[in-house]
Amino acid sequence: MRVLMLAPAFPSEMPFFARGLASVGARVVGVGDQPVAALPSMTREALGDYIQVPSLFDDDAVLGQVRQFAEGSPIDRVETLWEPLVLLAAKLRQGLELPGMTVEQAVAFRDKERMKQVLEEAGVRVPRHSRESTVRGCLEAAERIGFPLIIKPIAGAGSADTYKVSDRSELEDVLPLIRHVPTVSVEEYIEGEEYTFDTICANGRILYYNISWYRPKPLVARTVEWISPQTVTLRDPDAAALAGGRRLGRAVIEALGYRDGFTHMEWFLTPLGEAVFGEIGARPPGARSVETMNYACDIDVFAGWAQAVLHGRLAQPVERRYNSAIIFKRAQGRGRIRHISGLESLLTRFHQHVVSVELLPPGTPRRNWKNTLLSDGWVIVRHPHLPTLLHIADCFGTDLQLHAE
Ligand SMILES: Nc1ncnc2c1ncn2[C@@H]1O[C@H](COP(=O)(O)OP(=O)(O)O)[C@@H](O)[C@H]1O
Ligand SMILES: [Mg+2]
């Protein structure tokens, strides 16, 4: 089977998905904007063919080039695991008359207002919401919805241009900051803890699911630099306290008619125990979450996704053995990383629970922590017992420090 994979090299997890596809027998046709020589070796080894396009964001040009390729070598499926290309993948399927998610379905995954509208019609609890593109519209929506509220781009990512607003005067302060965003969602602010519900589906059935817990909520993580944010993949996603989220997740997938591939939903658990929808993407979670899923079960979720989309089943048994947490670090100071403190003693204390350390080495310039959750590096730890895992993760949060100048 010939599978077209959009963006097989970026973001950094994509080579693993490309390798997964090749490992289950697909002939992988990559589509990307880099020259072959610039692709990571894992991607190059996984690819049977490669179509280099001038830009992945010129839909018509990509369709033209892919069509030309497909005349000589027919394509069976189009896949992407990168959010900005979900709609392009659907357009290519439509243009090539291939099965899989349609443009209409893809829009419901990309447009946060359309998403909530479809889900509301299906009886799913979503925050009260409104689509607005003028200052006056935002002010009126705020009156209807009430404070506190959230204002965010209609098709955003990574909490960019997202604000919590507590009253009218804060709203008036925020509106000029988001003037460059043409259309926004104004939403009821949902208090509570924030979790994910991630799935791999085949033929509309959930073959694998995962619940991760954000510590703290992504919006807080993106607002306060000194925090070392954690994503904690839970060993027991079947816990009674999370039942509402599981029900919500299943209802959302059904309402959106999702059939094959990865999904990544975010939801809130309120202090009263209510599960409220946040958002969903037709793609895996980013920021190395798939790796934490691998470490939680000692499986290869990248290959699992490929097995599901190609063969409709998961070949690996899922035994949940550990909670695993990724802790993202942000250096103190600006410029280049100069030294790292605390790592040795943490490794001495917790070495058997530490599965990955990927900190920027001294001499490297800091990454922009606002643009990437990966920040200046990360550590992944795991432990069967959740309170112990949280303790270890918090020690890496507080006692490991990167210094830059
Ligand atoms: N209605 C809401 N109530 C409370 N927090 C919200 C709400 N909407 C968004 N947030 C916060 O903002 C973050 C980013 O919003 P989200 O809709 O997930 O957009 P993105 O595509 O940027 O991830 C969420 O993870 C959450 O922390
Ligand atoms: Mg989100």
Image: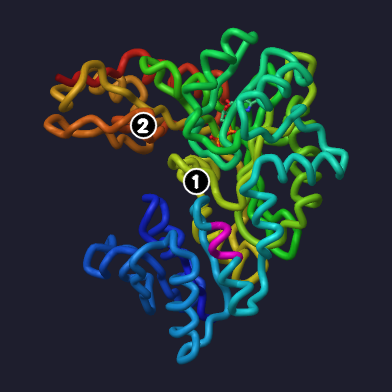
Residue at 72% x, 21% y is 140
Residue 6 locus on image (x, y percent): 46, 64
Q: Secondary structure at mark 1?
A: helix
Residue type at numbered disc 1:
Val
Indicate the quadrant where residue 297 lies. top right
Residue depicted at 64% across the width and 79% down the height:
97
Q: Within the magenta stretch, is there residue 215?
A: no
Let me know if residue 87 is in the magenta part.
Answer: yes
Vertical order, 151 against 19 (above or below): above
Segment tinted magenta in the rendering: 86-90
Point out which mark residue 379 bears.
2
Mark 1 crowd level (few <14, some 14–19, many ≥20, 10 Å Cα): some
Magenta stretch, overall SS: helix
What x and y, as percent, mark residue 218? 52, 26
Residue identifier under label 1:
290
* Secondary element at image label 2: strand
Q: In this rendering, would 303 be left or right of 130?
A: left
Kind of residue indicated by mark 2? Val
- Quarter holding the N terminus? bottom right
**Could you tell me residue 349's position as x and y percent?**
33, 20
Q: Residue at x 76, y 52 (%)?
A: 256
Please state which of residues 141 and 245 is positioned toward the viewer in this rendering. 141
- Name the quarter showing ligand 2: top right
The answer to which quarter of the image holds residue 269 is top right
The answer to whether one can see residue 348 in this image is yes
